[in-house]
Amino acid sequence: MIAVLAGGVGAARFLQGLVRVVDPADITVIVNTGDDTNLHGLHISPDLDTVTYTLAGASNSETGWGLAGESFRAMSALGRYGGATWFNLGDLDLGTHLFRTGQLRAGATLSEVTAAITAAWGIELRILPMSDDPVRTTVELSTGEVVEFQEYFVRLRHEVEIASIELRGIETARPAPGVLEALEEAEAIVLAPSNPVVSIGPILAVPGVRGVLERRRSAVVAISPIVAGEALKGPAARMLRELGHEQSALGVARLLSPVIGGFVLDEADADLAPGVESLGLSVRVEDTIMRDEVVTERLARAALGIAGTPSLSGGR
Ligand code: FO1
């Protein structure tokens, strides 16, 4: 079994390649819930939904989030009343939020709701939230103002400088059922190419998770979400810099080095390989720009190869 720590869009793209290499029934994805938010009385789990919709082949491929073929009639109706419309919830997407919110209110756990949603989409991989307890990533801007993650990412379009990140509720959050077992049993654990601070970070911060990865680091491999100093999507690069880390793939390797044994760099960063190796990590240099599923499949094989599971990666 392969375990994957996943955020949103980049992780979902990677998983599309992984399922071409590993039987989906042998994959457990542990998804960040720090991006979750409550809007209009609805509980929204963006990373869980992005992974689910993408693996169901139903996601909006331009944006990477939400559903293909969406309409936004409910949002325009909401706008009439002055409701918040900066977070675009499509009419079909609202079906997911209505179901999840109703189930949670009726006493179901986030894990139970997630299992129902992924089953309804016919997804074979096991998709687990990192925790069933509420964790909310908040961002302190350099102005001192503190905003919830989606306010920072969407309403402010992450065009503001940040001073710090806080994970509200993380101290009392328990790993969701199956999370620690999956991390203990996995032949390989892959940190998908997601934002190391606000996507991978919250998962590592769930009490109990970091300890397992530290102990099993030789089976853990990360794929750099930063190529030539930039993120392919989102604010990961500038967040690294603003939080005092080096804004490069080497900066990511350094940040993750206590919990990984291997690191996949993009070809553009081949010159950083010696620096990554000096952290005690084994390195693979690959094309990590996931423009299509062939590239993504090869990336998945490379990641599994470096984690010491060549058998699973098609005997590369
Ligand atoms: N991202 C945006 O940039 N603009 C949006 O209006 C937006 C709406 C949205 C609705 C549902 C959902 O699941 C995700 C949505 N996202 C939107 C993406 C989301 O903010 C990010 O994908 C994650 O939080 C970061 O990984």
Image (cartoon, helix red, strand yellow):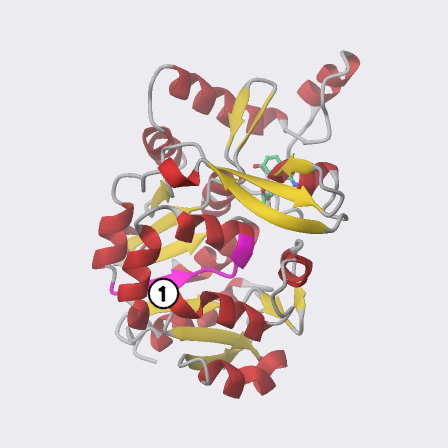
* Residue 91 versus residue 132 in the image, above or below: above
Residue at 45% x, 52% y: name it.
6
Q: Is residue 63 left or right of residue 36?
A: right
* Residue 183 versus residue 126 in the image, above or below: below
Q: Which residue is mark 1?
A: 21
Quick one: SS at disc 1? Answer: loop
Residue at 48% x, 59% y: name it.
14
Q: Is residue 177 visible?
A: yes
Q: Is residue 236 left or right of residue 30?
A: right
Q: Is residue 244 magenta?
A: no
Residue at 52% x, 58% y: name it.
196
Residue at 61% x, 40% y: name it.
149
Quadrant for ligand 1?
Answer: top right
* Residue 151 versus residue 82 in the image, above or below: below
Provide the residue span drawn in magenta. Answer: 187-197
> Is the residue marked by circle 1 packed among few (<14), some (14-19), or many (20+) residues within 10 Å?
some
Residue 166 position, x and y percent, is: 54, 43
Q: Is residue 189 magenta?
A: yes
Residue 178 position, x and y percent, is: 25, 44
Location of residue 305 (image quadrant): bottom left
Q: Is residue 121 left or right of residue 179?
A: right
Farthest top residue in view: 81
Q: Amino acid at mark 1?
A: Val
Viewer-proximal residue among 281 and 270: 281
